[in-house]
Structure formats: C-alpha cells, structure tokens
Image (cartoon, helix red, strand yellow):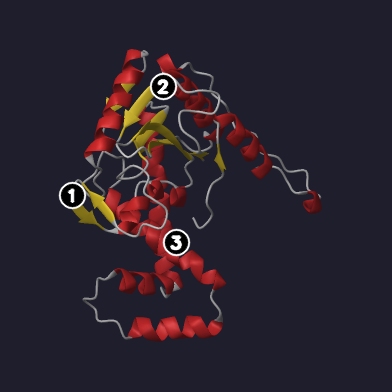
Amino acid sequence: MVTPGPLARHPRDLNLLLAALTTPSPDENNPWSVTLPTAQRPIGQLRVAVWADDASCPVDRNIADAVAALEGTLASAGASVHRTAGPVGFAESLRLFEQLLHATTTAATDDAAGAAELAAARDLHTDDASPRAAILRHRTQTHRAWLRANEERLRLQQTWHRFFADGQYDVLITPAAPTAAIPAGSRSLTVDGVERSFFDQTGWANLTSHVGLPSLVMPIAHGADGLPIGVQLVGPAYSDRTLLVMAEQLALLLGGTAEGVIAPWSG
C-alpha cells in the first residue's frame, strides 16, 4: 500500500516490468516463480462493468463525459458493458484502506517519534474527526484493532471475488481520479466548482491495493487544458497480465499509437 506501481509508455513495457518484479533477485538464490494467466479474449467479447461515479468521491463533468464516451466505444466494438454500483461501499473501503495504510507506515518510525504519537493520540478529544486525528489513531491503534481491520479486509476480498465471479465480469472500469491530471505541486482540488479534500485525488486508486487486486491506470482523453483524463482497469485477483492485454487492445480501439493514447501508463 505504500509502494507506487511502475510507469511506462505502453502496456508491453509494463509487461516487461511485471516480469522483473515477479522474478527472484540474483542474491535470493531461490527457484520460486510466478505464473500469471493471460486471457486472450478479443475486446469485442469483453464483459465490462463500469463504476462511473460515487457520492463519496464525485467526479467532474469532464471525467463523467469521458467515461460515458468510453462506454459507448466499447459497446460499439461489441463488448458487453454494464454500468453498476460498486461492489463495496466506497467510504467504508477507503476508511479501511487508510487504517491499514497508516498502521503500515509506522514501520519506519523510531521509538521516540512513536512515543510522541502515542501521547498525542491520548490527548485527542473523542469528537475530533479531523484528518490529523484519524491518522494519529490509525498509527497508534492496538494490535487487536489491526486484527479486526485485517478481518474486515478479508471480507472485502470475498465481496470483490463474488462481484467478478457472479457478475461474470472480465474487468471493472472506474475513473482514475475525480478530475483530469492536475499540475505538479497542486494542493487543492475542485470538482465542478466545489472544493473537495485533496485526498480525493487518490480515492479511486485506493479501492484495490489493500484487498490485493490488480489495477492499471490508462489515459483515454484530454481535458480542456490539455492534461490527460484517465480510467482505472480493475480485475479479479492475479489477472495482472490480462489487464495489460485489455489495455493494449483498448488503446488501439481509441486510436492510440505504439506509445499509447497519452503517456505514461501506470500499473
């Protein structure tokens, strides 16, 4: 959850990076290997679910229009496209992600800083719902609280599994972010004129990592200011290579070149 995925100009490059990440390093002296399945289903035979928006992390009109256009393009190519509500509660999933994330980041905290955080957490008012308070509580939670959160994570994994299996979906498409890409260094976020928490910028991306699902972000259009608009492809567990094949086919369908529609890609 605290490791960014690789960036590349094309899905084939991400495929190479995935191979490197799933191969033992020379100093491991270990013969382990990972074999990930690759479905070769043509894009016209894909079963696509689309989670286009959510009240907990609303998207702006540019994103909504781009996702709708993508739905139309896929349907015209013969894919089965179904707009659906998310399989999990967005706010609940994000809260769990943040709880597990902040607990994980304490591994790099020294004892003095950890003690200071414990003291600060004890001084919090019970009705303090600020982001700072939430982070402090997560970073100083008990092992019992973490075990309960991990159990909740396992239940979410089962919910996601049923979503793909029962719905017979190959892929779920979501927005990559509430807006088109923002200029580097920005620390504010406005969605259709309404100021939102800057943390919304990673809300959609945070749906999958704590439950172990592969996701890939790809560009599909440009916003009015020329910055890219992206979507996130989410697949069932271990469908990493299948998502890469889908992304390459989708880029070609959208009229992309060998370098994709807009560089870079992320997986």
Q: Position of residue 2 (x, y in %)?
A: 51, 58
Q: Position of residue 178 (x, y in %)?
A: 30, 45
Q: Give the secondary structure at mark 1.
A: loop
The alpha-carbon separation of the residues under discs 1 and 2 comes to 29 Å
Q: Give the secondary structure at mark 3.
A: helix
Which is in the foreground here, disc 3 or disc 2? 2
Tell me which amino acid carries mark 3.
Answer: Leu
| Marks 1 and 2 close (CB-CB < 8 Å) | no
Q: Residue at x 46, y 28 (%)?
A: 261
| Marks 3 and 2 close (CB-CB < 8 Å) | no
Q: Is residue 6 above or below residue 259?
A: below
Residue linked to disc 1: 193
Q: Residue at x 78, y 48 (%)?
A: 30
Q: Residue at x 53, y 30 (%)?
A: 244
Name the N-terminal-most of marks 1 and 2. 1
The alpha-carbon separation of the residues under discs 3 and 2 comes to 35 Å
Q: Which mark is residue 123?
A: none
Q: Give the secondary structure at mark 2.
A: loop
Q: Is residue 180 above or below residue 128?
A: above
Residue linked to disc 2: 254
Name the N-terminal-most of marks 3 and 1. 3
Q: Which mark is residue 101?
A: 3
Name the N-terminal-most of marks 3 and 2. 3
Does residue 83 show up?
Answer: no
Mark 2, other Cα within 10 Å: few <14 / some 14–19 / many ≥20: some
Q: Is residue 108 above or below residue 94?
A: below
Tell me which amino acid carries mark 1.
Answer: Gly
